[in-house]
Image (tube, helix red, strand yellow):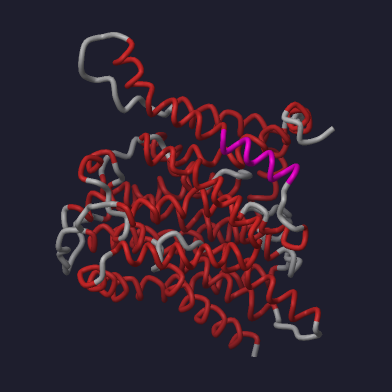
Amino acid sequence: MVVVNVIIGACAGTLASTLLSVLPGLHVYNVIGLLVMLQLTLASHGLTVGPEVYLPFMTGMIVGWSLLNTIPAVLLGAPDESALFTVLPGQKYLMFGRGYEGTMITGVGGLGAVILLVCVVGPLAPRLLPPVQEVMRPHMHWILWIIITYILMSEWPKGGNWGPAGWRKFMDAWRSLGAGLLTFLLAALLGFILLYRSPVSSAVAFQNIMPAFVGLFAVPWCLVNMLSGTRIPRQHLTESLDILPEHVLRGVGAGGLGGGLAAFFPVVTGGVGGLLAGHATAQRDERVFLLSQGVSKLVYYSGAFLLLFVPGLGITRGGGAWMVRTLHTAGTYGDYFMVLAAMALSGAIAFLLMDPLTRSVIRLIEKVDYRVASAVALAIISALVYAVTGWIGLGIAAVATGIGLNPVLFGSRRLNCLGILLLPIACNMSGVGHHVAAILGLVK
């Protein structure tokens, strides 16, 4: 019966992720937070759902969303014509009528990540990761500071290439750099406030950061899509993908490295891990880049969730794992292999769904303006924020939106918004977080 429950839970979670993933800006952790609240409410009334049901269900949601969220990321993220050659390869594929191909190449990377997690990481993790964690634990703080330094230093001027030398050229060059640094610092300030003086009710403390992340990342994307005057060109559906086995191997290697770093190190996200791995492995081929991003995203989200269940490891990474920990104490091999099996099943189902879903979304955007989809997504995520955190959460999201629009308007990396986690946690891990909060007037 347990096996049947696991299969049903994983399949149901994957199917639920299809609805969740096709709307731009809607994050799987927002929905998992609501599920955790629902489970706690049911438990308070004496009604319980067994972990053999809700754990595979949440696993299926995370794996399915990690794979299928590529569809809106590529097909509903049309850039302005002036920014066409400064955007990611996925958007370039879209604007050249190859959105289907770009989506499916990224999906192949996600499938490669599932195979990597289940067949390689799964058998080795219980034996290798506990001693690695024991060795790395004392050094986490300075590693995190190095990552922060690299993120800020690797931001490159995007202007100042034309015209006579002088202050105008200098200021033009520093326009994006300054916006990136300002975004990082403002996001970090918001992070300190939420960490030490959060206005969010303690009853939903596990969703403390959710409104800020919605404002930093989801709302600006929806707003830009709604205000953009770009027309998406007709998309061409191909019967084959222009990739070779060597591209897949390189993409899985780079993406697995980036996603693995992000999953293992605290507060390092998939975007940061992908940046580090891409630079370390010098990936320049756009096909390899798309493959590696598909791998990195799935390894980050699913791998971070899997770490919660690795016997003998005892670490929690990622918002999904933190929320599930309030419901279930993991650590047995039974839980570990149950989650691995759910990952394998949901990964296979999600990949099989990618082709029909991608074709359906392409037909939809040919008939319905993608601005409408973005407006619907904005309404849904705003309702979710209100349902979980109330008007205070919407206020936090509004403030975060102002910060999150800076990279969009000034051409800097949206990665700088992660200062909301990186700087406060780095200060706390180094033992100076309380002193910084005192300087900011957040504590006495």
Residue 97 is situated, as x and y percent measured from the top left of the image, at 16, 58
- The one of 429 and 234 positioned closer to us in this rendering: 234
Residue 422 is situated, as x and y percent measured from the top left of the image, at 60, 38
Which residue is drawn at the image coordinates 74% and 69% (left, top)?
328
In this view of the protein, can residue 246 be seen by the observer?
Answer: no
In this view of the protein, can residue 341 be seen by the observer?
Answer: yes
Which residue is drawn at the image coordinates 35% and 75% (left, top)?
352
The answer to whether residue 102 is left or right of residue 270 is left
- The one of 2 and 162 positioned closer to us in this rendering: 162
Residue 193 is situated, as x and y percent measured from the top left of the image, at 69, 41
Residue 94 is situated, as x and y percent measured from the top left of the image, at 23, 55
Which residue is drawn at the image coordinates 55% and 73% (left, top)?
341
Q: Does the magenta stretch include residue 178?
A: no
Quadrant of res 134: top right
Which residue is drawn at the image coordinates 68% and 76% (left, top)?
38
Magenta-tinted stretch: 186-197
Q: In which quarter of the image is the C terminus?
A: top right
Q: Quadrant of the N terminus?
A: bottom right
